[in-house]
Image (spheres, helix red, strand yellow):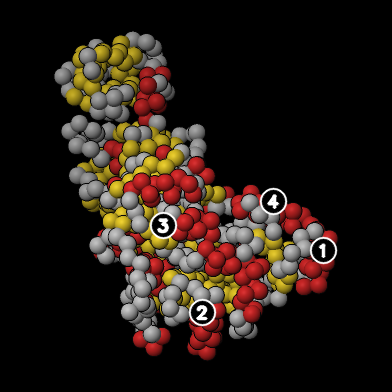
Amino acid sequence: MPTLTPFKKILIANRSEIALRIIRTARSMGMATVAIYSAADRGAQHVQEADEAVFIGESEPAASYLNIDKVIEAALASGADAVHPGYGFLAENKAFAAACIAHGLVFIGPSPEVIESMGDKAHAKQLMRDAGVPCIPGYDGEQQAPDALQAEADRIGYPVMIKATAGGGGRGMRLVASGDQFRNALASAQSEAQASFGNSHVLLERAIQHPRHIEIQILADRHGNAVHLGERDCSVQRRHQKIIEEAPAPNLDPATRNAMGQAAVQAARSIGYEGVGTLEFLLDTDGSFYFMEMNTRLQVEHSVTEEITGLDLVGQQILAAQGYPLALTQDAIQLQGHAIEVRLCAEDADQDFMPQSGRAAFWHPPRQARVECAIRSGDSISPYYDSMFAKIITHGPDRQAALSRMRQALDDTVMFGLKTNLPLLHRCLNHPDWIQGGVSTRFVGDNKDSLVVPAVARHEPLAIAAAFKCHQPHATRLRRGLPALVQLSDRTQDAATQVKVTWSSNQDYDVVLDGGTYALTILSADGAAARIAINGKEYKVWRHQEGPQSYLRWNGQDYAFVDKTREAHKTQDAASDGLIRAASSCKIAAVAATPGMTVRQGDLILTTEAMKTEYQHLAPFDGTVREIPVQKGDQVSEGDVLAMLDPA
C-alpha cells in the first residue's frame, strides 16, 4: 500500500470560473473549500460558493492573487491543508509551490523542481531533446546580446520566432520575417517579457509557416505511472491565445496521433511528473511534430478531454496529490465522441481584440450545453484580470453533432452591455476551412476580413427597438392610428434617429424611419426572448431594457441604443412638426385650446401634472389647432401625442 498524503480542506488560489470548477469537484469528494478574493471580487460567485472565504488584498493581481505571502497566510489562517492553484496567476510559479510545501501545505500539482525545469522554455527544450522528444530547430543558449542573437537568427533562417523563455500566452513572442526586422522585434519581445515575467531572456526557433497547435493531455502519479488522454486541437487563436479547442483533433493521421501520445508520456516519465499536465506540440504540414512547451497545470481547455473520456481531471489532480496510484492503464482509456469548447471573451475585435471591461447588463448562458462561468447579470468584468468570462462546451457522437450543438448553444448565448467575441466565434465555426478540419494557427489572421466584420447599421434593429419601446398597455401608451415619435441613437454615436411608430391593431405596428416603412408584429414578448415578424417574416430576438439603454440581438448581431426620446420631447414644444407630446407619464390637468382654434406661438394649449408638478405645453408656432386627442383627467405616458397643430 503506497504512502498517502490525506487532506480534507483545499484553499483555491484563484478566482472566477476555475475556482467554481474546483469547488464543484472538491465538494463531490467530501472536501471543504476556501476561496480567496480581492477587492474587485468581494461579491464574486466563487466567494459565495466556497465554504469559507478570505480577503487577501486590493484589486491589482500583484497585491492579491499574485501575492504569495498573502495566499499562504490565508491558507494557514483558514486551516486548509492543501492548495489548488487553478490556472494562471501562481499555477506555474515554483516559488509558490515551494512556499506551500515549506508551510506544511500540499501543493496540488507537480514538484517545484519540475515546475522550474519546464517553466523555462530553453531548459525545457534541452530536457525534451534528452528524452528523445522532437524539438524545433533553433537557439536556446545563454547568450542574449543582440549581435549574437541576430547571428543565430541568420543561421536558423527566416522567418524566425522569438519567444520569451519564462512565460506564455503570446507575451514576449514575435514573428520576424527578415533580418532587417530582427533588432526591433527583439527589443520589443524582450521588453514585453521583462514586464510580464520579470525576465527578458528569449530563445529563437525556426518559424513553421502553417502549423497546427496540437496538445496531449497527460496524467501521472508519484509512483512512475503515466498515461495520455488523447489530444486537443487548439489551432484557432488570436494574439497567440486560444479561442476554440476540440478533441480529438480532426483529420489527424492515426500514426501521428499515436506517436505524439507516446512522446508525451515519455516526456512526463523522464522528468518525474506528478498530476495533470499538457505537452504542447506544433504539427507541420508534412506530418512532422515538434515540442513547443509543457504546461505544468490544469489547462483552460481540459473540459473537452473530460467530455470524451468521462474523467474528472480536477478529481484526478486531487487523487494524485494525495498519493494514490493511477487507476487507469493506457489500454483502458477509451475516447468517446467529439467535444468542442469556445472561450467567450469581453473584447473588441474591431480594435485588434482589445479587452473590454465594465458591467454585464444581461447575461444568458445556453441551457443545452456545458457552461463554465462565474458571471451573472449585473456583475462587472474587471479590467484587472483576464477578459475570458465563460466557456461553452458541447459533446456529440461525432464532430458534426458537436458542431451543430455548439451553433445552437451560441445562438442562445447572450451578453449585453459589453462587446464580446461571440460574432467571431460564430463566423469561425461556419467557415468552410474550419468545417473541413485541420486549420493552422494562422486561420484567424489569414481570414480576418471575413471573420472580423464590423457591425453594419441597419434600419430593422432601430425599428424593432422603437416598437418595443411603444409596446406597453395600449390604453396608456398609444392611441390607434396616431404616430408616436421615438428618438434612438446607437450607443457609440451622438446623433439620434427619429422613428415614427403607429399602433395599428393588436400587436401590430407600422414603423417609419429614413423613408423606410416596416410592418412589425410582436408575436410574443415574455422575458428577454421574443418573437417578431417584420414585413411578414418571423424572427427570434433577444432584448433587454435598462433605463435609457436598449439592447437587442437580431439576426445574429448585437445592437445597443440609447433612448433620447425624453430629451427630444423636452424641447418638442419648439419642434416644427406640430405634435405636442407628453415628456413623461402624467395626467391631463387642463385643456385650454379646442380644435380649429387659431393660436400664436407661446399660447397655452394644455397643462399636464406629474408627481404634483404641473407642466404647461405651449404652441410651438403660429397656426391652427388640428386635433386634441386627450381630455381633462386622462392618464397618458411618455411620448403620447397630446395635441396636433398646423402652421399658419
Residue 124: quadrant of the picture: bottom right
Of badges 4 and 2, nearer the viewer stands: 2
Q: Mark 4 points at which residue?
A: 191
Give residue 480's position: percent from left, percent from top: 22, 36
Q: How crowded is mark 4: few (under 14 residues within 10 Å), some or many (20 or more)?
A: some
Q: In this view, does 286 lie above or below 80?
A: below
At label 3, counting other C-alpha atoms closer than 10 Å, the crowd grade (few under 14, some 14-19, many 20 or more) is: few
* Location of residue 283 in the rendering, given as x and y in whole percent from the top left corner: 59, 78
* First-in-chain label (2 vs 1): 1
Residue hosting label 1 = 148
Query: For mark 3, what is the residue?
Result: 104
Quadrant for the C terminus in the image: top left
With 386 as the anchor, is 471 left or right in this view? left
Quarter of the view holding residue 569: top left
Label whose residue precedes the other's in the sequence (1 or 3): 3
What amino acid is labelled 2 in the image? Arg
Mark with earlier residue (3, 2): 3
For this rendering, which residue is in front, 611 or 114?
114
Q: How far apart are marks 3 and 2 (CA)?
A: 26 Å
On-image quarter of the N terminus: bottom left
Disc 3 residue type (three-letter) = Gly
Residue occupying the point 36% across, 77% down: 2
* Residue on which the image places disc 2: 269
Amino acid type indicated by mark 4:
Ser
The answer to whether 366 appears left or right of 170 in the picture is: left
Q: Which mark is residue 65?
A: none
- Observer able to see residue 405: no
Select label 1 or label 3 by which is in front: 3
| Comes first in the chain, label 3 or label 4 | 3
| Secondary structure state at the residue bearing disc 1 | helix
